Amino acid sequence: MIQLIRGVKDILPGEIGLWQKIEKTAISLFESFGFCEIRLPIIEHTELFARSIGQDTDIVEKEMYTFLNKKDEMITLRPEATASIVRAYIQHRLYAIDPVQKFYTIGPMFRRERPQKGRYRQFYQINAEVLGVDSPLTDAQLIFMLVELLKRLSVPDVCVYLNSLGCPVCRPGFKKSLQKFMSNTTAMLCSDCERRKEKNPLRVLDCKVLACREAMKDAPSIIEHLCNECEEHFEAVKNSLNDLNIQFEIDKRLVRGLDYYTRTTFEVHTGSLGAQSAVAGGGRYDRLIESLGGPSQPAIGFAIGFDRLAEIISSDNAGVSCKPDLFIAALGEQARTNALKWSCALSLSGIKTETDFSDKGLKGQMKKADRLAAGHVLIIGDNELSEGSAILRNMMTKEQVSVPIDGIVEKLKSIFV
Ligand code: ATP
Ligand code: MG
């Protein structure tokens, strides 16, 4: 038997109602904030991710699924969506229409991580990105929208963590002081961090290894190194969040696992997820568009972990319905021919109609209608055909009424729509 690849999963019909509910809630909320959908390919040139996410990050160093295609080009299954959004913005000159573009996208991402609960090798994200705006009010608005989505989905124990990563003016000073801190500590770092501490010391703050976390507990804070402009920006984000009644905590270690972030960064955690408690993360990437060859435009966005969101709210929301409104139990060839016509017509008008064209008897078909939790069953056999009326049974109340075959589709529509 051929089974699933490690770290990926099927989303079965029993769970799909929940996934669709999350999707619909996000889409309707995002669109009311002026975001438009963009759909992007799953494969891109490896260089796009190497250049944007950064060479020394876990994602680029260890987690990408990369292959050579026939032309000897390096291709990668996307580990995240922001880079592709920026590529599309540049490639299609969307900034020429209006530098301000607001996108959302939903789809699978791929990272070769150690599979565990809440961590998969193919997982899904919901992204929202605002390109072309540097106002801190946008940062607050975006975080507000994210929190509102979690509220609408009844996610419990939501906590927003906030930090600023500064900019090319103030970050070098912070890096130096971080390096100084590390050279003075005797604590052991993991081999990755030992290697990265010279080239990319911020990565050490993001390391998941317990010993590294312990070693960096008292590391200097970037907030103390922010230049005036970054500090003002950060203050304005905090004030605007307060104005919008969004609670948050400052987390000075929050540097995120991608190199492109500048200024505002944030993560949203929930108490109900256990070890993998981050349900969403995001931040500003004011330099990314330019560094990928586009115009100098700032941007900010977030990615929500769809799988984790589904896990949090699965227990009470499962099984949104594929339940038929009507099951047509047809007995005999002529009745089945009618059932085919009627069910097609009813389905077209949006009534969930189910049939069984196998040779089952009435008992077998009623059993099936029960299993599908159909609301009503329409019974039609030779007797009913000759009498010119079918029997409509309400499966809840067990009440039965007779419905004339002549004009039956219209009659049923008037009952169910
Ligand atoms: P983490 O700290 O949990 O590794 P991350 O910082 O790598 O997360 P991002 O790249 O910011 O995650 O992605 C945003 C969200 O996507 C995360 O908050 C998480 O909910 C989800 N996510 C990231 N990696 C995975 C994965 N391998 N499986 C499932 N969900 C994931
Ligand atoms: Mg990660």
Image (tube, rainbow, N blue to C red):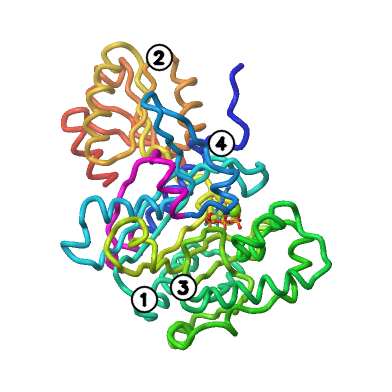
> Which is more N-terminal, label 4 or label 2?
4
CA distance separating discs 2 and 1? 58 Å
Which comes before the other along the chain, label 1 or label 3? 1
Disc on the earlier residue, 2 or 1: 1
Residue 151's tag is none
**Residue 63 image position (x, y, % from top left):** 57, 43
Label 2 to label 4, Cα distance in Å?
Answer: 32 Å
Of residues 176 and 304, which is closer to you in this image?
Answer: 176
Q: Is mark 2 within 8 Å of ligand 1?
A: no
Which stretch did the figure color magenta? 27-52
When the figure is inspected, residue 107 is found, relative to residue 221, above or below; the finding is: above
Distance of label 1 from label 3 (alpha carbons): 21 Å
What's the residue type where badge 1 is placed?
Thr
82 to 269, vertically: above or below:
above
Checking the image for residue 138, the label placed there is 1
Residue at 46% in and 68% down: 283
Q: Identify which amino acid the numbered label 4 is placed on.
A: Lys
Quote the CA–CA distance across marks 3 and 4.
41 Å
In this rendered view, identify the residue nearer to me: 197 or 160: 197
Which residue is the site of mark 4? 9
Q: Are marks 4 and 1 in contact (CB under 8 Å)?
A: no
Mark 3, mark 4: which one is toward the viewer?
3
Q: Position of residue 167 (x, y in %)?
A: 46, 74
As drawn, the label of residue 358 is 2
State which mark lies toward you, 2 or 4. Answer: 4
Cα separation, mark 4 vs mark 1, equals: 36 Å
Q: Secondary structure at mark 4?
A: loop
Q: Position of residue 34 (x, y in %)?
A: 27, 66
Front of the two marks 1 and 3: 3
On the image, numbered disc 3 is attached to which residue?
A: 168
